[in-house]
Image (cartoon, grey):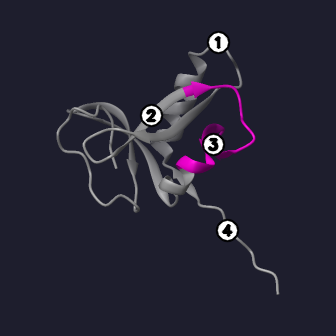
Amino acid sequence: MSSVIEAPSLTLSESAAKRIAFLVTQEEEPDTKLRITVSGGGCSGFRYDFSFDAAVNEDDRVFERDGAKVVIDEVSLDLLGGSVVDFVDDLMGAYFAIQNPNASSSCGCGACGLACS
């Protein structure tokens, strides 16, 4: 009997895809992607880190919408599976936000910079 293991998914909102595409045009490397990693820290134990990277490592998964690409390593993807990456531009500022169904709490202190899980 064989079994199929489905990899966790990630969704990019339209606004996130547009912002990523815009920011990539500002980079010198034409094949730049937004890299999202989950690291220890923040008031809830984890925090999301965003950076730009042209490399795709062996343990990375690439997600794409409208030509904008996001790269996430397997360990981070285990914590982000099923999440939606959005870009918010409101009175509080402009930032990437992650709606993570796996998060048991969220940051409210403002010290984490970006959304914590």
Query: Percent from the top left, x then y, of residue 45?
Result: 32, 46
How many neighbours does mark 1 have within 10 angstroms: few (below 14), some (14-19), or many (20 or more)?
A: few
Q: Which mark is residue 49?
A: 2
- Distance from disc 2 to disc 4, alpha carbons, whole Å, reads 25 Å
Q: Residue at x 44, y 34 (%)?
A: 49
Query: Percent from the top left, x then y, of residue 113?
Result: 29, 31
| Residue range of the region highlighted in magenta in the rendering | 52-76
Above/below status of 76 relative to 30:
below
Q: Amino acid at mark 1?
A: Glu
Q: Which mark is residue 6?
A: 4
- Front: mark 2 or 3: 2
Above/below status of 110 relative to 73:
above
Q: Is residue 24 shown left or right of residue 116?
A: right
- Distance from disc 1 to disc 4, alpha carbons, whole Å, reads 35 Å
Q: Residue at x 65, y 62 (%)?
A: 7
Residues at marks 2 and 4 touching, judged by CB atoms closer than 8 Å: no
Q: Residue at x 57, y 25 (%)?
A: 52
Q: Amino acid at mark 3?
A: Asp
Residue wearing tag 3: 66
Please report whichever mark, 1 or 2, sits nearer to the chain's N-terminal start. Answer: 1
Please report whichever mark, 2 or 4, sits nearer to the chain's N-terminal start. Answer: 4
Q: Nearer the viewer, residue 77 or 21?
A: 77
Query: Percent from the top left, x then y, of residue 40?
Result: 40, 40
Q: In the figure, residue 64 lies in which quadrant?
A: top right
Q: Residue at x 58, y 59 (%)?
A: 9
Query: Percent from the top left, x then y, of residue 29?
Result: 68, 17
How many neighbours does mark 4 have within 10 angstroms: few (below 14), some (14-19), or many (20 or more)?
A: few
Residue wearing tag 1: 28
- Front: mark 3 or 1: 1
Please report whichever mark, 3 or 1, sits nearer to the chain's N-terminal start. Answer: 1
